[in-house]
Image (cartoon, rainbow, N blue to C red):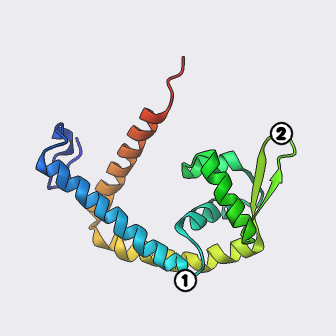
Amino acid sequence: MLTCGCLDFAAVTDVLTEPVHTVWRAFFRMQRELDRVIEAQLAEHRLSHADYTVLSVLAEDDSALRAGAVGDRIGWESSRLAHHLRRMEQRGLVIRTICPSDRRGTMVAITPSGRSAVEAARPGHLEVLRRHLIDQMSPSEVSCFTELGQRVASSVEAAMTPANG
């Protein structure tokens, strides 16, 4: 059972109760406002949050990644990723090539311009996250938030994964 001092999440069964609506509205508002401030900060570097997400994954590797692996890491469907990579390639942030081992696949690599953009944006991005998320919580709330986030993500992933068999 996970408790954070204000609501026993294990006891929530009726999605129409006021405490559940309050939690949902607070989460939705938090997500919206964080997205807004993150987008504004990244726009200073001519990047969208989506650009930053893709570039961050690609910047972790020195070599190209299969597009499918990038999509898996960020949770995007292949069509969304393909369209976004095309736009990023047009802006010189990434380069796409045919996979040498499977010509049906696409490899994606960050360009020097893309690496410079993500590295320039990173300090401000981390400052926004620290100031508007982490600094708003006590250490115990950070632990609670982390545990809850991992539990929710695992629950959703399990629900979205087709059953084997």
Q: Secondary structure at mark 1?
A: loop
Residue ID for mark 2: 102
Task: Residue type at mark 1: give it.
Answer: Glu
Numbered badge on residue 84: none
> Is 74 placed left or right of 117 in the picture?
left
The x and y percentages for residue 20 are 18, 48
Furthest toward the top, the residue is: 165
Q: Is residue 60 above or below residue 67?
A: below
Look at 20% across and 45% down and name the residue there: 9
Relative depth, front residue between 139 and 23:
23
Numbered badge on residue 44: 1
Name the image quarter holding residue 45.
Answer: bottom right
Mark 2 or 1 closer to N-term? 1
Name the image quarter holding residue 11.
Answer: top left
The N terminus, quarter of image: top left
Furthest toward the left, the residue is: 18
The x and y percentages for residue 35 are 42, 67
The C terminus, quarter of image: top right
The x and y percentages for residue 154 are 42, 41
> Is 49 placed left or right of 106 in the picture?
left
Relative depth, front residue between 77 and 151:
77
Local crowd size for mark 1, using a 10 Å CA cut-off: few (<14), some (14–19), many (≥20): few
